[in-house]
Amino acid sequence: MATFLSPEWIDLVRVSAPSFATSVECAVTGAPAGDVRLHAGVEGIGAGSLDGAEVALTVPYADAAAIVRGELEPSVAFMQGRMKTAGDPGRLLDLLAASATPAFREALARVATDTEF
């Protein structure tokens, strides 16, 4: 089991999740160990910031955990203002559409199974 947002968890995501066509930086705020930044794109998934990311997301810890557990759709978090965004609006819409696919949901389910929240 990997603890949510730990370096081991990021490794788990790296091997479980599909690659992203859009470069994304995600900040998870209010995590028990402090704020965490992750990034994803065609080069893969990793810890830290991503210079030149097409889309930036900021999500509170509880909502990020709910997304990974499959309890909260990313598009719902966005529409409710729970996920803040910046960057290219077209790429954001592409990203939200991709998060509604079976492949994305299956990847989240694989990650959630091996995650300690």
Image (cartoon, rainbow, N blue to C red):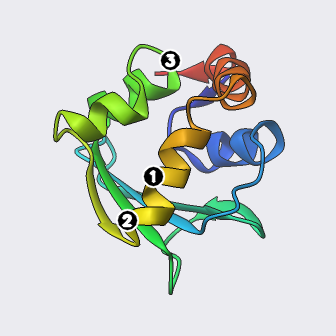
Marks 2 and 3 in Cβ contact (< 8 Å): no
Q: Which of marks 2 and 3 is nearer the N terminus?
A: 3
Q: Which amino acid does label 2 sit on?
A: Pro
Q: Residue furthest toward the right? A: 15
Say above or below: 62 vs 12: above
Q: Earlier in the sequence, mark 1 or mark 3?
A: 3
In the rendering, at what x and y percent does residue 103 appear?
Answer: 75, 29
Q: What residue type is labelled 1?
A: Leu
Question: Residue under circle 3?
Answer: 69
Question: Residue under circle 2?
Answer: 89
Q: Can you tell which of label 1 and label 3 is closer to the viewer?
A: 1
At mark 3, the secondary structure is loop
Q: Residues within 10 Å of mark 2 (few under 14, many from 20)?
A: few
Residue at image coords 55%, 31%: 3
Q: In this view, does 110 lie to the left or right of 99?
A: right
In the rendering, at what x and y percent does residue 115 appear?
Answer: 60, 23
At mark 1, the secondary structure is helix
Q: Residue furthest toward the bottom? A: 52
In the rendering, at what x and y percent does residue 21 appear?
Answer: 70, 62
Q: What residue type is labelled 3?
A: Arg
Q: Is residue 112 left or right of residue 77?
A: right
Query: Residue 54 shows which numbered tag?
Result: none
Q: Mark 2 to mark 3: distance in Å? A: 26 Å
Residue at image coords 51%, 33%: 4
Marks 2 and 1 in Cβ contact (< 8 Å): yes
Say above or below: 67 vs 42: above
Q: Mark 1 to mark 3: distance in Å? A: 22 Å
Question: Residue under circle 1?
Answer: 93
Q: Is residue 33 left or right of residue 12?
A: left
Say which quadrant the C terminus sits in.
Answer: top left
